[in-house]
Image (tube, coloured by chain):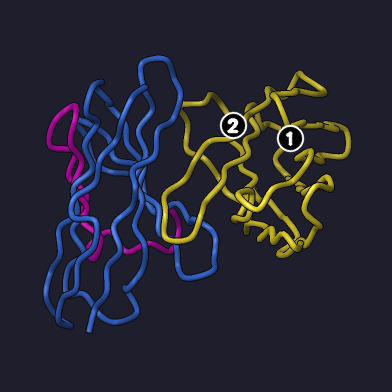
């Protein structure tokens, strides 16, 4: 089946630094990808929709200047957490719909900001 | 608006059936899903149902949809210790390629 990968799988950074997370569709092209955030023991909250060739669409309450999304190619979307703070520590998960319209989720990236 | 609600915890005895319930508010929901997440792991799609269906069965899993009441349930027959996980109910409006809205998740624990 289709596979979506994320890199890195985990990252620890100092407060104030920026962190880039990659989401790749390994064997299909995706013009749209979705980024979710999951805090401990909570549900997945949709942050934004990454669109190839146009700006990302952010959900209400998500700061677009803090969470920069770039749909670099038909197989790659990146999420950059700028000036990360401890409250940004979370599990970030991406998903991509395959040509068959089934959504595939990445394994997630655990971000810890010290 | 879009809202999906679930109870937070469920405890069942090994071998019994587990029934996890979910309600949603968006009458435009087209696809309704059940995902499983084990500790520290990503999401696993268990099953999904189209909004024009009432029931779907897949081995030990049975999904029931009451569209009038906007109620979805997942029944796991013969629950095993490997079924311990968090189960998320979710919906998407237009197609399975649309953004997916998740419920809060139900933590299923199995007791001997």
Chain identifier of the yellow chain: B
Question: Which residue is rendered at x = 34% and y = 57% of the image?
Answer: A92
Q: Quick check: A15 above or below A1?
A: below
* Residue located beneath label 2 in the image: B93
Label 1 packing within 10 angstroms: few (<14), some (14-19), many (20+)? some
Chain identifier of the blue chain: A
Question: Which residue is rendered at x = 35% and y = 33% of the image?
Answer: A96
Q: On the rendered image, what quadrant is the N terminus of chain A found in?
A: top left
Q: Nearer the viewer, residue A15 or B27?
A: A15
Q: Which mark is residue B27?
A: 1
Residue A58 seen in the current view? no
The answer to which quarter of the image holds residue A86 is bottom left
Q: Viewed as shown, does residue B109 lie left or right of A65?
A: right
Say whether residue A59 is magenta.
yes
Question: Which residue is rendered at x = 60% and y = 56% of the image?
Answer: B86
Q: What are the residue bounds of the magenta stretch?
A: A58-79
Work out how far the residue at label 2 is from the one at label 1, CA to CA, in angstroms: 9 Å
Disc 2 secondary structure class: loop
The answer to which quarter of the image holds residue A87 is bottom left
């Amino acid at each position: 089946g289709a596979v979506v990968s994320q890199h890195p799988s985990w990252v620890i950074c100092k407060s104030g630094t920026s962190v880039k997370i990659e989401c790749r569709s390994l064997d299909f092209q995706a013009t749209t990808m979705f980024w979710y955030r999951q805090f401990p023991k909570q549900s997945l909250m949709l942050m934004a929709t990454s669109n190839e060739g146009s700006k990302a669409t952010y959900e209400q309450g998500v700061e677009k200047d803090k969470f920069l999304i770039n749909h670099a190619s038909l197989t790659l979307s990146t999420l950059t957490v700028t000036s990360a703070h401890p409250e940004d520590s979370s599990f970030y998960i991406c998903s991509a719909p395959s040509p068959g319209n089934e959504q595939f989720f990445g394994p997630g990236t655990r971000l810890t900001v010290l | 608006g879009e809202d999906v609600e679930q109870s937070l915890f469920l405890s069942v005895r090994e071998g019994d059936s587990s029934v996890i319930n979910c309600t949603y508010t968006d009458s435009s929901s087209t696809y309704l899903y059940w995902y499983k997440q084990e500790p520290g792991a990503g999401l696993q799609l268990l099953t999904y149902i189209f909004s024009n269906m009432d029931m779907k069965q897949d081995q030990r899993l049975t999904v029931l949809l009451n569209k009038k009441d906007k109620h979805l349930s997942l029944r796991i027959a013969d629950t095993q210790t490997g079924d311990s996980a968090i189960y998320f109910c979710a919906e998407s409006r237009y197609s399975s390629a649309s953004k997916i809205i998740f419920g809060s998740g139900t933590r299923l624990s199995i007791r001997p």
